[in-house]
Image (spheres, helix red, strand yellow):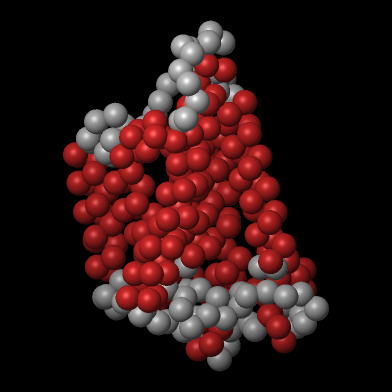
Amino acid sequence: MTTSTEPIAREWRPKLLLFWNCFGLLLLASYFTPIWQPVDLFLFQLINQPLKDSHALRVFWALANHNLADWLEDICFLALYIIGIWKTKRGYRIEKTMQFLFSILLTAITIILVNRFLCHDILRLRRASPSLILPDAVYLKDFITEISMKIVSNKSFPGDHATTALMITISYAYLMRGKLAIFALFYGVFLCLPRLAVGAHWPSDLIVGSGCITLFALTWAYCTPFATICTKALNFFPKKGKIKA
């Protein structure tokens, strides 16, 4: 099934903008309550503790956290974009490409300005990962030394890797819809798991930290004309009319 219409907003969507921003604010406020301490501990142990007795799981998560895994993820993103463009009607493929390009640039700018500049440099948010705090956490480097991987962090909130994965895959799902959208969403959730499994992040670093940043960035992009304006600005190809599929 091909797509031809623009899913991004040409006008303000105040109700959706208000709803999702209120939800994001409530989620962020919950971070300062005691609720996340037991949730963090339970979810982390649920995914980390099985590594004690399974060499296969230890190797799998070690490989998933290797630097080369990031390149593989980028290849998968590229494949999703190519498939998405191919499934779009020919007269709209350049437009769809510009939408994807906008989502990539929005993600990169958000990581630089919000995650790193605002959260780490300005607010100086510091949080030690569970691998540095919990004595019973499975420290993967005690078992596997030949694979280079990230398993500790002194600035685990928010997670850069999770923010990138969520922003790109949710944007893709919004722009494409259908089966590709469902696959992208599941893929985005999976990409958040490797850092969590080895103890480089707490669940709330991803759910609250990366989740709120993703929510605010995408709602202000897609529930306002901002994405449309930027997409048109990126489309430097001359208009030649729509080509029938």
Corner quadrant of residue 2: top right
Vertical relation: 162 (above or below) 87: below
- Identified at 31% across, 53% down, the residue is 216
Residue 96 in picture, x, y percent from top left: 50, 29
Residue 112: where, in percent of width, then height? 43, 63
Q: Residue at x 76, y 70 (%)?
A: 59
Residue that lies at the very extreme toward the bottom in this rendered image: 135
Viewer-nearest residue: 101 or 218? 101
Q: Is residue 176 visible?
A: no
Residue 84's image quarter?
top right
Q: Is residue 100 above or below residue 46?
A: above
Judge from the rendering whether residue 134 lies leftward or rightward of residue 37; answer left or right.
right
Asked which quadrant contains residue 230, the reply is top left
What residue sits 58% from the left and 57% below the top?
191
Quadrant assignment for the C terminus: top right
Q: Estimate the x, y position of residue 232 in percent, counting from the top left.
A: 39, 31
Is residue 245 depicted above or below 99 in this figure?
A: above
